[in-house]
Image (cartoon, grey):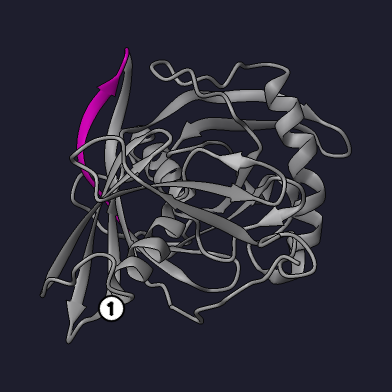
Amino acid sequence: MLICEPRGYHGTYGAVIVDATVEEADFGVFFMETANYVPYSGVNSIAVGKGMIEVGIVEAVEPVTKVVMETCIGLVTLEFKVENGHVLEGTVKNMPCFVLEKDVKIKVEGVGELIVDVCFGGAFYAMVNIEDVGLEVGLKDINQLIELQHRITEAVKSVTEGKHPITGLDIFTNVIFYMNPKQKGGVDKHVDIYGMKEWDRSPCGTGTSARMAQLHARGEMGLQEEFIFEGATGTQLRGMILGETQVGEIPAVYPQFTGKASVIGLNNLILE
């Protein structure tokens, strides 16, 4: 009714607010796209938190309002910068993120052999260097990247389980096509293609977290080092790794990312 045609379209995301089951959380939330329910969404958490504060469900506290959400994969803490009751930006302190498998060789129809990393940032991603498929991060190549996404995820699933070592989560439809910065300190560009021909207009919060885990594992991003991550439409997130940890036997990091959201309407929808 809400996210599919005619009110929505294939790129629409939904967030459903529910009562939390634990005292530490302000509320619970689960997310859905047009093809599936998804365990968690990073940038949509910023949108949800901003909306809950600005409509008064969560009390605005200046200069920083802390929000704890209960999601399908655990508690997520957010901090919102607030001035005069208005949310300026939100920061997600994400769960432990990691590289599950590095340098996985796959064969993709129409492309040939690719080497990818499988990373977790709140969801699992196949991380593909976009130069290996001869394309660029941007709007002009989106349709070609969409056509590659399903072939890549199927190829990855044929050679690896892609399962979280603690939770057992194994939902896997996402591909991050990334472009390495041309110089140290430059903007890191990537685009998330997911679901059924869907693509993230933002740099994607969980995808950015997966990218930070990948960069750290490869010695290209240190602790407390801020990077700028840019999506296909030019929107940006600021990302930083707060610390290191382990998930089972796997080295992991605690990433955070900061971005903006906008309240664009309050709607009453009728199902007749």
Residue at the top extreme, as displayed: 249
Q: Quadrant of the C terminus?
A: bottom right
Write the residue at 30% across / 35% down: 21
Percent coordinates x, y for residue 80 in the rendering:
23, 66
Chief secondary structure of the magenta portion:
strand
Relative to the observer, which residue lies in front, 140 or 183?
140
Residue 34 included in the magenta stretch of the image: no
When the figure is inspected, residue 101 is found, relative to residue 183, above or below; the finding is above
Q: Amino acid at mark 1?
A: Leu
The secondary structure type at the circle numbered 1 is strand
Q: Which residue is mark 1?
A: 88
Q: Quadrant of the N terminus?
A: bottom right
Relative to the observer, which residue lies in front, 163 or 28?
28
Residue at the right extreme, as displayed: 110
Percent coordinates x, y for residue 122 in the rendering:
43, 38
Q: Which residues are magenta?
A: 239-248
Q: Please count the marks in the image.
A: 1
When the figure is inspected, residue 181 is found, relative to residue 165, above or below; the finding is below
Write the residue at 54% across / 31% down: 117
